[in-house]
Image (spheres, rainbow, N blue to C red):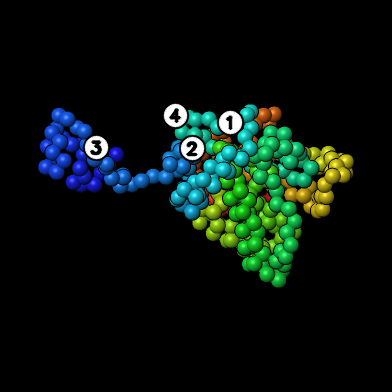
Amino acid sequence: MMRAVGEMPEWPNGTDSKSVVPSPVPRVRIPISPPLHRKSPVAEKLRGFFVFRGCSSNARLQIKDDANAQCLTQKIRQAPYLNTHKARAINGVVVTMILVVEGISASGKTTWCAKHGGQQVVPENGRFEDVPDRKRDPVGTATFWAERNVERWQKALAMEHVSSWALCDSDPLKLHYIWCLWQIGEASERDWQFELDATRETFAQGRIGFADCYIVGSIDPQLARERAKADTTRRRSGFELHVRLQQTLLTWYSAMDAVLPGRVQFGFPAEMPALKNLDERYAVAVFDRMIASLPRPADIS
């Protein structure tokens, strides 16, 4: 414990002229000053609970005072945990992970997420109102979708911080969608470029990044149609468009696998992958290399 320079000891170590207490008989206890850097008791309890890695400063969760710490404590108590997939530590470091599951409509990704993720699943975005018109306002549209992607990524980060892992039903970094549309002639190169610019800006700001693991499923188009027809619980507007996007979606994640080896797994596994820490979550250079490696529409077979 630190005390100010010149602080009197807690017990006299010599004769005190005022109390006249000889050093061998310490009967008078002199209260000491509080530590120079008093820490919040609640924050101290939470210290070490989280291990933050790879996040930009504005994405890190910080405990600034008792009020914030108390609120965070309450969230931790209320957080859902799955006993079958708890956090583990490697060399004393808590391992955390964001996992993404991708695939076209009716490929089985949502079913897989529900089976293996439980309450750790970050669901897909629903329908939005007041979406800008891409033809009238391409820049506004690109910014709108880039911000929606950031919101999902922040939800995944919050889940990861509290529960050590999060499972995203579809990629928060959904830049692949406009790229895939461009490849099949359903969007222009200008649309792709606007959304790329908006997304790269959020990536460079550390507001969105790469997940630690990607599971990408594929399905026979006819089987997907049969599944979609049999499932009366969900609306699948634009289903045939999604079927056409499957090959380009696989191309996108093959490009990601090339710049981030071992991070992409094709096909739905029987079990959840083990938690693992990976670097380059916010590596803009890796993002740029991946984009540069993507083929143009004429190169897609």
Q: Mark 4 points at which residue?
A: 91
**Amino acid carrying mark 1 in the image:** Lys
Label 3 secondary element = loop
Q: Which residue is drawn at 46% across and 33% down?
A: 93
In contact (CB < 8 Å): disc 3 and disc 1: no
Quadrant of residue 79 in the image?
A: top right
**Amino acid carrying mark 4 in the image:** Asn
Which is more N-terminal, label 4 or label 2?
Answer: 2
Q: Can residue 211 be seen in this view?
A: no
Which is more N-terminal, label 3 or label 4?
Answer: 3
Q: Name the residue under label 2.
A: 49
**Amino acid carrying mark 3 in the image:** Arg
Nearer the observer, 155 or 284: 155
Instruction: Estimate the spatial distance between the alpha carbons at disc 3 and disc 1, rounded to whole Å.
Output: 49 Å
Instruction: Give the number of the disc on residue 42.
Output: none
Label 1 secondary element = loop
Instruction: Estimate the spatial distance between the alpha carbons at disc 4 and disc 3, rounded to whole Å.
Output: 44 Å
Q: Residue 96 vs residue 268: left or right?
A: left
In contact (CB < 8 Å): disc 1 and disc 2: no
Image position, residue 183 (x, y; %): 70, 54
Q: How crowded is mark 4: few (under 14 residues within 10 Å), some or many (20 or more)?
A: few
Q: Mark 1 points at which residue?
A: 86
Which is more N-terminal, label 2 or label 3?
Answer: 3
Q: Give the position of the N terminus as an image quadrant.
A: top left
**Amino acid carrying mark 2 in the image:** Phe
Q: Residue furthest bottom?
A: 136
Question: In front of the other: label 2 or label 4?
Answer: 2
Question: In front of the other: label 1 or label 4?
Answer: 1
Instruction: Give the number of the disc on residue 29.
Output: 3
